[in-house]
Image (cartoon, rainbow, N blue to C red):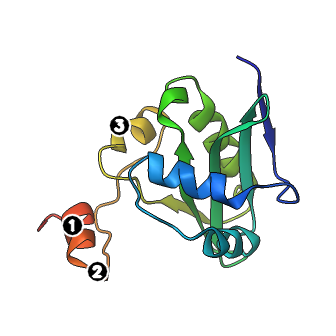
Amino acid sequence: MNVRYTTSIETINWKEVSDIFKAVGWGERLSEQVKLSFERSSFKRFAYISDELVGVGRTVDDGYYYGWIVDLAVLPKYQRNGIGSQILGELENDLKPFLTTMLTAAPGKSSFYEKLGWHKQRSAYIWPRSEEQIRSFSEHG
């Protein structure tokens, strides 16, 4: 499988990015908001097979102390082919200068990160914006 990775946002079809998020079960995200979030992110990666966008990832950070890997998603039909691992590794490398690198795993995806050397935090909290966030991200859900 020939996968091409890029950091460029110049030719991204933001509807395709939104479609990836929907395909992995993250719900509907408006293309324009997705575009703005990636434009404001320090580091981003896009994975293509031929001309099909199959995976994405990005970071948010404060420029020195904390960097978070967020929105790592691969179309379900291409998962388990190393694409997510490659995107994750490249973003980890981008964040090496930061003192701390963290991420929030999507529900059910903890083992993916743990097998790649990530460690679960003792305490992390969310200020829920909805009942769905409580169900998805907290022990009380």
Label 1, on which residue?
A: 138
Residue at left offset 75%, top offset 68%: 42
**Image quadrant containing the N terminus:** top right
* Residue 80 point in image, percent of width and height: 49, 25
**Residue 81: numbered disc:** none
Label 3, on which residue?
A: 111
Amino acid of disc 2: Pro
Question: Mark 2 against mark 3, which lies toward the viewer?
Answer: 2
Q: Judging from the image, what secondary structure is the residue with disc 3 in?
A: helix
Residue at left offset 31%, top offset 51%: 107
Residue at left offset 27%, top offset 71%: 133
Left or right, residue 92 beside residue 101: right
Dividing the picture into quarters, in which one does residue 18 lie? bottom right
Q: Residues within 10 Å of mark 3 (few under 14, many from 20)?
A: few
Tell me, yes or no, whether the two marked residues, 1 and 2, touch with CB atoms within 8 Å.
yes
Dividing the picture into quarters, in which one does residue 43 lie? bottom right
Amino acid of disc 1: Ser
**Image quadrant containing the C terminus:** bottom left
Closer-to-camera residue (128/36): 36
**Residue 72 showing in the rendered view:** no
**Residue 128: numbered disc:** 2
**How far, Cα to Cα, is label 1 from label 2?**
9 Å
Amino acid of disc 3: Ser
Q: Judging from the image, what secondary structure is the residue with disc 2 in?
A: loop
Work out whether mark 1 precedes mark 2 in sequence or the reverse, and give the earlier one: 2
Closer-to-camera residue (103/81): 81
